[in-house]
Image (cartoon, helix red, strand yellow):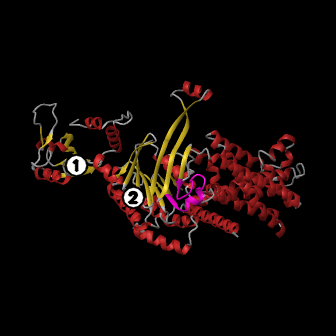
Amino acid sequence: MLRFKRITAEVQLIFAYALANILSALEYRSAFIVQVIAMIANNSLWLFFWWNYFQQFPLVNGWQGTDIVILWAVAASGFGVSVAIFGNARQIPTLIMNGGLDAYLGMPRAVLLHVCIAATDPSAWGDIIFAVGAYLLLVHPDPLHMAIFIMLIPLTALIYTSFMVLLGSLAFFLGNTEGFAQQLFGALISFSTYPMDIFNGFVRVILFTVLPAGFVSFIPLQLLHHFSWPLLGILLGAVAIFALGATTLFRTGLRRYESGNLMGAQM
Amino acid sequence: MSIVEVEHLAKTFRSRERASGIAESMRSFARPRYRTREAVKDMSFSLEAGEVLAFIGPNGAGKSTTIKMLTGILYPTSGNVRVLGFTPWQQRHQLAYQIASVFGQKSQLWYHLPPQDTFNLLARIYELDMNEYRKRRDFLIDVFDIADYIRTPARKLSLGERMRCELAATFLHKPRIVFLDEPTIGLDVIAKQRIRDLIAQLNVEEGVTILLTSHDAGDVEQVCRRAIVINHGEIILDESVATLKSHYLKAKTIDLQLAGTVEELLTNEAGDQQSRLKLQLSTPELDREGIQVLKAQGHSLRLEVDTDRCPLEPVIASIMQQQHILDMTISDPPMETIIAAIYGSQGTVDNSIPSPAAVESAGLLAE
């Protein structure tokens, strides 16, 4: 009962922050709309490129045009939700370097969750709108597949977020890792939008371990093609391992936190 | 009963050190040299419920670092701390419901949103009952007189208005201890006074314990009853503010802009250039030795008055009888001077702080 109350309180906090972030973004209505449209256009351009490619070569290593649509829809929706709800995870290295964690440490909430939900990027809504739109319009899923797709969104979002937290938390131990974290996170996004079957051997091992692109693209795609409980179990296990790893690394690093004296404001 | 107990608290930071220049930078990259700095050294003190304690010292003295350890933000290198029965860095979560902190240089208000929205969010963060929260919010809006701009985005508020909203936000969850780190920094005289009055009011009405750090001797004098002075991470004085005032806060600086020239007010009794100028007083019973002329040029005059020997009011009245005053500012001595005076009275020398005599002579007479 107590645990249920705790979870309810955390969910309420997530909603409260999501609302505050949306209100903050809407203060600049035009900028918000432009960012969302720009993101939809950016994603659509890539999808158009792949769609044209598959018109020329209908089958590449067993992959079809609709597979790429599903891949992009899963990756963009997971990334979009990760940034729309846990968007501040990308700021962790900066917060560690500038003493920005003070505000969260002084409040009675789980620090990591609080840091992650405290800010978002409005363009993430462009990713979400694009992903759901592309999946509905180009794949025409039945209700069952739509339900699986919706279930996969929070799981992939958690992997993206955990990976960002893992990279960001390295700043506790290594100093300024902002550039390194952005490069590796960019690599994760790139690899998660390419057909997995073009990679073999060592690269494929990498994509299921240190750079978990396989868990945010290949496995969700397989689950949407041929749902199986063991495969879902593997995905849930990966989510648990990455989330636990991220939490542990952040918590361990927090002991080394040195704060700072930079002036600042909650945006 | 002590609600804050600090025993032998210490915090050491390790930082890389190098000289300037590309060659040094490359050398440091290949073979880094580290320096350890003791930000807080063997600090012990306690705080009773309802007390208003000033924690004062110059930049880098260790004030903020100590507050951060008391609120659980930083882990100490050694020592013990109990705040409301909790060890802050181990029971940060439980402690956070009962304390609040305001860092004058870091805003908790959302920059683009009205304070009202930040208040709503804080209600969720502190898990307040929404009916109780609304009553409390309305009470604080009334006390802090912020009804006019509670719906204005924080970015459009003046610093004084913003700070009142910050303080109102701090008291939303009825904290038992409030840590205020430089709450009046950057504020003008009127806004400073308003903030000081509000802090004092909430201390009296709600019995909240306050630990305040400041550079401004006025904050200490008007809000606090006890002061701990720290420098280089060590406590150099723990006294009542009344004692501090009678020993170290007795000198006031008066800056005057006069209608006439300063020569009409001053006299040089020895008649030579080296002797100090004295103020001519229309009230002979005033002790002129308690008045020092720090600067005299054209229409500007700066005096330092020892309020123990010479009350302020008759001095100003005496000047007004002889000259028309266009503008006047009365200020406390800078914190550095107070600390230098404390070191002086303890018979120790701190080379990093200018002595009162040095501060005085640097600004003496016309430049």
State the separation of the CA atoms marked 2 and 1. 33 Å
| Of A248 and B11, the residue lying toward us | B11
Q: Residue furthest front?
A: B1
**Residue A106 x, y percent position in the rendering:** 55, 56
Q: What residue type is labelled 2?
A: Gly
| Of B95 and B273, the residue lying toward us | B95
Callout 1: 10 Å neighbours few (<14), some, many (20+)? Answer: some
**Residue A184 x, y percent position in the rendering:** 71, 44
Q: In which quarter of the image is the N terminus of chain A?
A: bottom right
- Give the tally of numbered discs: 2
Q: Can residue A142 be seen in this view?
A: no
Q: Quadrant of the C terminus of chain A?
A: bottom right
Q: Give the range drawn in magenta.
A: B82-100
Numbered badge on residue B340:
none
Q: Name the residue under label 2.
A: B160
Q: In which quarter of the image is residue A21?
A: bottom right
Q: Name the residue under label 1.
A: B308
Q: Which of marks 2 and 1 is in front?
A: 1
Left or right position of A219 against A160: right
Residue B95 forms part of the magenta stretch: yes
Q: Which amino acid does label 1 sit on?
A: Asp
Left or right position of B162 against A209: left
Q: Can residue B266 be seen in this view?
A: yes
| Of B229 and B214, the residue lying toward us | B229
Secondary element at image label 1: loop
